[in-house]
Image (cartoon, helix red, strand yellow):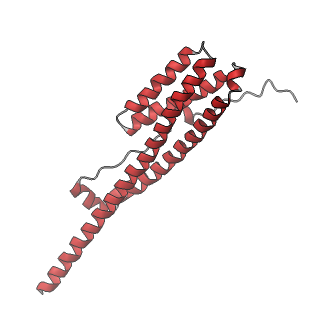
Amino acid sequence: MNWIFYGVLALIIFLVIDCYNRLVKNRMQTKEAWSQIDVQLKRRNDLLLNLIETVKGYAKYEGATLEKVAELRSQVATASSPAEVMKASDALSRQISGIFAVAENYPELKASATFAQLQEELTNTENKISYSRQLYNSVVSKYNVKLETFPSNLVAAIFGFKEADFLQTPEEEKAVPKVDFSGLSD
């Protein structure tokens, strides 16, 4: 009779250890997915330094735009939580679009090979950030589901596992753009 008790106890201990290890693995995957976003954000910050210097040489009268980019770049670098990082990052992405729009007013800047290369690299990096955000949210979803399903939820509660936050899309990006076709003729 004792061997049955010890067998069941050993099985329960094994299941708890296995469940704990799976939770740790999922939590680490969440951290790894965040680190991929972080790598791309750092790359974008490095590219922005070069872009600012390039634009400064051509667009001497666009100081306010460049200062705003530098300020937002600093906010991304000093943010303390993923939500703060992504909020500053989203604002920075919108400001980068503003720099590209400014370039339209400076034909010699637009024709610069350095500017064109930086623009392409920034666009690629923005795409990588977008993909990394999707991956992060997918990994967070899997992790959070583990935290809420039985028996993982019991192990998570015992060992203090916490839910990870999703990266949300800013409200202004969710808004449906207004399109006015009234000026078009048939």
Residue at (17, 84) in percent of width and height:
4
**171 is higher (above) or lower (below) than 23:** above
Residue at (49, 51) in percent of width and height:
135
Image-quadrant location for residue 113: top right
Q: Nearer the viewer, residue 97 or 2?
A: 97
Most distant residue in the bottom direction: 1
Q: In what quadrant of the picture does the N terminus appear? A: bottom left
Residue at (20, 79) in percent of width and height:
8
Residue 132: percent from left, percent from top: 50, 47
Q: How many badges with numbers are in the image?
A: 0
Most distant residue in the right direction: 186
Most distant residue in the top direction: 61
In this rendering, would 166 be left or right of 178?
left
Residue 180: percent from left, percent from top: 73, 27
**107 is higher (above) or lower (below) than 149:** above
Q: Nearer the viewer, residue 128 or 149?
A: 128
Residue 40: percent from left, percent from top: 49, 41
> In this rendering, does residue 25 appear at all?
yes
Residue at (63, 27) in percent of width and height:
100
> In this rendering, does residue 151 appear at all?
no
Image-quadrant location for residue 179: top right
Q: Which of 1 and 22 is in front in this view?
A: 22
In this rendering, would 23 be left or right of 2?
right
In this rendering, would 73 be left or right of 52?
left
Most distant residue in the left direction: 2
Residue 162: percent from left, percent from top: 30, 50
Q: In what quadrant of the picture does the C terminus appear? A: top right
